[in-house]
Amino acid sequence: MKALRQGSAGARRASRGERKGKIRPTSERRAFTLIELLVVVAILALLVSILLPSLQKAKSLARAAICMTNLRGIMTASSCYAADNFETLPAWNYYIDKKDHWTHQLAIYINRSVDVSNPDQRNIPLYQCPESADELVQQQTVAWWKDQMPVTYGMSYLGSCTDFSNPAHFDKYRYLKESMLASTSEFLLYADTLAPGIYVPTVSKWTYPWYFNHESNGYRPGWKYMIGWRHSSQSPFELDDPNALSNCVFLDAHVEAMNSETFARYNPTQANAKSLRFP
């Protein structure tokens, strides 16, 4: 009898051991419930909504940094051009001949292998703000700009006028030299501008390949629409938004991001206006 009980106990232990080591079939494993899946999806959506604005801001800041680097590179090329041309800076003379426009004059200093006479080689990334892709698409449809380079930076009109005491600036030119200015660190030479030839819906006007915002009576609001207020704004046309910024490079090669109010103070300063005989 005792032996029978011992045998029965051993059998039960063996049976428990078999059950303990037995692996459940896949179909018997516990799956996620619908509520658990919805909770996971909600958490992921919340994380995306928190991180997405930060990622977009980081991308915008990166594009603004590239834009500043582009402007600094253009100013460096301008200094090299001046060193080879009796200290004379390039100009925006689109109306004379496209080869006299600064985009063509500086091309060789940016890429020595470029041939500006070949339309297929006129696309120089340094001339384009990373935030201006939509403007460049529109510019390709502009007939009068089709032989020019895609560009979304502009040169100061004051860089190549013949006589600033004469209100009729368009028919004559002279070229700017650093020695003509009272303060090179206050002379804004290149800036973010809208792509030449595109339509500006906020003012119902077309853009030109320069910018010019100063008259004898001060800031000229009618022309500031040509500046590309691309940074920290929803649209490059937001010319009255105090938070909208345009990147600008000065003649001493330092770069600043400025809103329209700050921009007006440097275009030009009173000292430089006087040295240029501007009324």
Image (tube, rainbow, N blue to C red):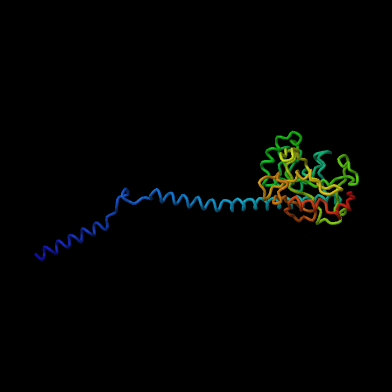
Q: Closest to the observer: 63 or 97?
A: 63
Whether residue 149 appears in this view of the structure is: no
Quarter of the view holding residue 18? bottom left
Q: Closest to the observer: 83 or 196?
A: 196
Q: Closest to the observer: 23 or 36?
A: 36
Identity of the residue drawn at 71% across and 48% down: 241
Image quadrant holding the N terminus, namely bottom left
Identity of the residue drawn at 42% across and 49% down: 37
Q: Position of residue 135 (x, y in %)?
A: 69, 41
Q: Which residue of the protein is positioned furthest toward the top in this rendering?
A: 143
Q: Which residue of the protein is positioned furthest toward the left in this rendering?
A: 1
How many discs mark residues in the rendered view? 0
Q: Position of residue 108 (x, y in %)?
A: 76, 46
Whether residue 142 appears in this view of the structure is: yes
Q: Position of residue 141 (x, y in %)?
A: 70, 34
Identity of the residue drawn at 36% across and 50% down: 31
Left or right position of 277 against 104: right
Left or right position of 82 against 15: right
Identity of the residue drawn at 84% across and 57% down: 183
Q: Position of residue 238 (x, y in %)?
A: 70, 45
Quarter of the view holding residue 139? top right
